[in-house]
Amino acid sequence: MLEDTSFAIHPDKDKQTNAQAYQDIGRVLEYKKTDSNYYFICENGNVMIRFFTSSIVRVIMNPFEKPKLDLSKAVISIPNQVCVEAEKEKESILLTTDQLRLTIMTAPFRVKVTDKNNVVLLEEEKYGMGHKVSGEIVAHKKMYQTDHYYGFGEKSGFLDKRGEKYTMWNTDVYAPHNPETDPLYESIPYFMTLRDGRAHGIFFDNTFRTVFDMRSFSDTYAFMAEDGQLDYYIMAGPTPKDVLSQYTHLTGRMPLPPKWALGYHQSRYSYGSEAEVRELAEEFVERDIPVDVIHLDIHYMDGYRVFTFDKEKFPNPKQMITDLREMGIRIVPIVDPGVKKDSEYQTYQEGIRGGHFCRYIEGETYFGDVWPGTSAFPDFTDEKVRKWWGNKHAFYTDIGIEGVWNDMNEPAVFNETKTMDTAVIHRNDGKPATHRELHNVYGLLMGKATYEGMKEQLHGKRPFLLTRAGYAGIQRYGSVWTGDNRSFWEHLQMSLPMCMNLGLSGVPFTGPDVGGFAHDTNADLLVRWMQVGAFTPYFRNHSAIGTHYQEPWQFGQKYEAIMKKYIQMRYQWMPQLYTLFYQASMTGAPIMRPLLMEFPDDEKTYNLNDQFMIGDNVIIAPILAPSVTDRAVYLPAGEWVDFSDGTVYDGKRTHLIHAELKELPIFVKKGTALMQTKWISNTDKAPENVCMDVYAGTNEEKYIMNFYDDDGETFAYNDGRYLQLKLEVVSKKDAVSITVLNKAGDFKPAYSTIEVRVHGLAEDQKTVINGEDVRDKAMIDLVN
Ligand code: GLC
């Protein structure tokens, strides 16, 4: 508690720190190659180097024993056969692929990594790898003056993480998130360095508490772990997109979510009865505000017991769910890991009888306090337990539920440490390990159990999972929201870099609680946040018990109309968003991205926190402060068209843009295109349609749009039931030509044509589709 007072900065405090002796790895004593692994036995540690692909290399240093290769919960790919040239020189060993070159100095062991053009990615100088007697391990690398750092998963603060120091230890933080609140719920021990326009990545695959220090020294950065081994992957880039593709090659990509999960979600802690939920759904329909999902927070359960409904408040959930589906609305219930200790409760009985809960080495079950009171926690590190838990989701799927919300899965426990006793021993699929080692993967493995269980129960339909905690690889199972924010303008501001860095950390499906969770929201804040939410990959309005309700109509007609417009806009943009989701699922490229991703040579983008891109051609520049109606917007190279009124702005310049409360500044790059639909309502069951909006260029621009569509809810796309159109847009002085370069897949959408709308066509420009001049009927025919 003293740490919460000025004692924290007591002048004598430094003297209390116990500087433990640091042991450098020392000289190489022996070097050998076994299969494709290069081993270095050094004075104070053993190193193994292995190429995964020609542009991804894994380095493991274990100070005490032979490097262990099979600990990862995150990496799902296996090493390719990579052609490596190894040369031994007098004081160094060179390992070269066609993308990477490792120079290993032997006295002492130091590694330098360059790309194929000899550009240095990583370098170790005075300090390299080492450990402390306590078992702590650390790697130091040279920090360059021009380095900028991104990623690190879910962190508050600004986009560029140079000058920051972060800890990875999944933590439930209800206290207001401020720029130095760390750690939060997710641990993604990964970052990307952008140096002089080139990017490379490092993934430090260690599940213990880890620390990344890009702050303490001006010429060195370090990453360290409390225990375990220094097991890290270097990804060569050279573009930010390449790094993302390399990182997600290792840790996996987001499966394509069901389309409905991309819609608007309405949540509240809690909608407390069937009557309230029905009323809420009707309200949306009556007001003609589209909504895809209503969330059920903890009050739907019987005494917070997971896999139950409160029989009084929710007497007939199945009927409610069926009726809501008729209205085009789905229910997503919350499922926490804590299982109430209650000998008459079936899930608890099964867990105890089946030995499914986390236990101490002596065999006693671990109990902690969460919402239901004393609770036991499933040991998700065990396959048998994951199966049990996954199967239990039939309780939900049997009544028509297709999505689940996992919360408190850090795991959060109401005690001083905020989590489970680190002495608990997890079964870990036959390799028992303490909670101290596996804490950070508890949420990931709960996500795995839930996603896989739901998938099995849904017989071919795509499940949706929302999760609060996770580790590297969480994108394989769920979307992530940024936890308990507050209805502060500062939190709206912070949500942008937070989601962008999550996207750069391989997690594309993210969003904050729109409107703010804790604290009372207000009309202006909610409106501005809804405008942003309409363009964040995950779009859910959620608020806490005891706070002002924040459904779109809570502040009167004037505000409702604006919010409605932006929720509708979300639906209008659905074909575009779905295409971007598809791309994320294939390449790892985030949907919402910082400008530096598309403009890595433009320094102005390196720490641009209040603008973001959707895909490669749209910039969203929201207003993020009260009473503000004008803001500076930086537009990078190219010409940019204001989406609302067609005004054209020059790139490589900052513009002062006016935006009344009802306006969200959106800019589309000239010479590119977007896919949109006119479908914007739950009540309107009109056939789906897709339009292509082309923004005419003039300077010989060429743009490729890879449009994707499918049934939106099954895995039939794996059997070829998809529609993929490779569309080329070429703008010249006299014409804008749209050509279908390729059509693939045998999915037949409800629309048989795509209307083409060309914006900003110059007087002497004509529109050409597939080589033919078109005048009134600009259409792409999908049938012939
Ligand atoms: C946690 C979650 C929040 C939820 C609440 C009650 O605070 O982060 O979203 O509403 O628990 O379940």
Image (spheres, rainbow, N blue to C red):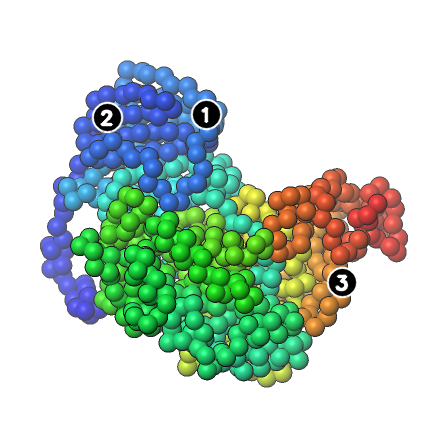
Quarter where residue 586 is shown: top right
Give the tally of numbered discs. 3
Measuring from the top left, give residue 417's x and y in whole percent: 24, 63
Gap in Å between the C-alphas at discs 1 and 2?
Answer: 23 Å
Image quarter where ligand 1 lies: bottom left
Q: Where residue 92 is drawn, which disc sits there? A: none
Q: Position of residue 136 (x, y in %)?
A: 21, 44
- Structural distance between the alpha carbons of marks 3 and 1: 50 Å
Looking at the rendered structure, the kind of residue marked 1 is Val
Position of residue 57 measured from the top left corner of the image (x, y, whole percent): 40, 32
Q: Any atom of ligand 1 within 8 Å of the CB at mark 3?
A: no
Q: Amino acid at mark 3?
A: Pro
Are circles 3 and 1 on residues that touch, CB within 8 Å?
no
Nearest to the eye among marks 3 and 1: give it: 3
Question: What element does badge 1 sit on?
Answer: loop
Mark 3 — residue? 687
Q: Which mark is residue 82?
A: 1
Q: In the drawing, what numbered circle is on residue 41?
A: 2
Say if 546 sits above or below 231 in the image. below
Give left or right: position of 387 versus 34.
right
Choose between 322 and 436: the one closer to the eye. Answer: 322
